[in-house]
Image (cartoon, rainbow, N blue to C red):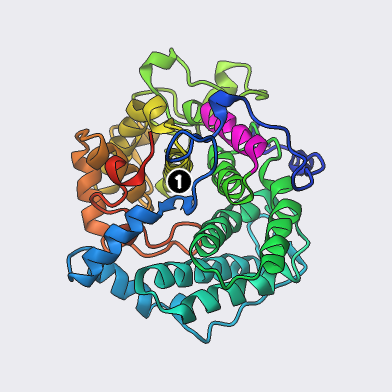
Amino acid sequence: MPVRKRLIAALIAPLFLLPGCAPAAPDSAAPRGANGSGVFRHPGVVVGGDGLAAVRQRVTEGREPWKSAFDAMRASRYASLAYAPHPVADVACPPEAGPPACLAEREDAIAAYTHALLWRLTGERRHAVEAVRIMDAWSAVLKRHSDGNAGLQAAWSGSTWARAADLVHATYPGWEPPAVERFKWMLRKAFLPAVTAPVADYNGNWELAMTDATIGIAVFLEDRAVFADALRRFRDRVPAYFYLTSDGPLPKTPPGSTLDTPEKIRTYWFGQRTYVDGLGQETCRNLMHIGYALAATAHIAETAWHQGVDLYAEQAERLRAALEFHARYQLGAKPPKWLCGGRIERTMGPDVEVALNHLGHRLHLALPETEKLAASRRPGGTDDLFVAWETLTHADGPGRADASGAA
């Protein structure tokens, strides 16, 4: 069995912390807030209030690509006011064969987030009510995620639930405090144990998606210890997933890894033996999983940025190289023989808008291939996993540094 597939027992996490019992994170890892206050900013899980206000104005003015992206979201099945959630107590997701509950949870989370966005962009209370109805249905029932894909399922759905909950709670006073507390408890009990589990030798898209959920949940719960842990895992995993020649002759490995020989590392990187700037651990698997990793990496950095922690600055060159490298091949460039044996599976989803917005439009870095890829996918919708409506929320500038208040 490849070393990247560890025992499922590795997904068992320590007992979760009770609300209010988490110790404070070190100051260097703490959110600084809009005014350097050390408090969390809401909404601030991937999307921020000022950025969404800019989107609302652009939609109202009929500007593109935001108008088309908004219309696509409003016309989607996720925006139905008759949307029927399907909560279950145990979302059991075995590898490669997820039952209907796994898909239902992810879709219900996207529906809640869709209605949260519609509420914020239209001011129509009925959408806030619908988002709350979906979230309350799940928090009344869900107890755990189980089976082999528990961590990944909890990551995909948990990242979206956190986005929806943070946006609604920050902007809609009608979500009653007992219901909010029940939803928070659900995130602590049914998500954090799975998404904070050690998975050092799993394919890296797992831990990046898990960290995406972790940081979003941390912000909604205002848990500084969990927030600090998410920052640590980002700093460990991103350099171990996307390669730069400055790393040395071989890719980095994450802490706790058993990849202790060059041959094990090559096997983990799907047989790749030549390493160049921007290459990803799963490039030679397919670009679909690279897309998941790029999207999760950007979600983590964007959430941290809204909280005043600039993870982008720490990995800007690595992320720029990864975006450009994979965008070029997704757009059809012929791979050389030394790269994945000359075969690339071009299956990337709508995964680049958030990272492109920061690197290209806040920092003004040149990303011509990524720009072309984003333009070819607009208006980007959802992958039905954990990416949703990011052309609408992040294309070409909404959420710039001067609007968001991040340091």
Q: Image point 48% across, 45% down: which residue?
A: 296
Q: Nearer the viewer, residue 338 or 353?
A: 353
Q: Quadrant of residue 29?
A: top right
Tag 1 residue = 299
Q: Main secondary structure of the magenta part?
A: helix
Q: Image point 44% across, 78% down: which residue?
A: 79
376 left or right of 241 in image: left
Task: Name the spot of residue 159 as percent of width and height, x first.
Answer: 55, 53
Q: Quadrant of the C terminus?
A: top left
Q: Image point 40% across, 67% down: which residue?
A: 120
Q: Which range of residues does the magenta coloring cover?
A: 223-237
Q: Image point 54% across, 24% down: which residue?
A: 28
Q: Quadrant of residue 272?
A: top left
Whether residue 39 appears in this view of the structure is yes
Task: Name the spot of residue 6 as percent of width and height, x first.
Answer: 71, 37
As helix, strand or loop, the secondary structure at mark 1 comes to helix
Q: Is residue 235 on the magenta stretch?
A: yes
Q: Is residue 204 on the magenta stretch?
A: no
331 left or right of 87 in image: left
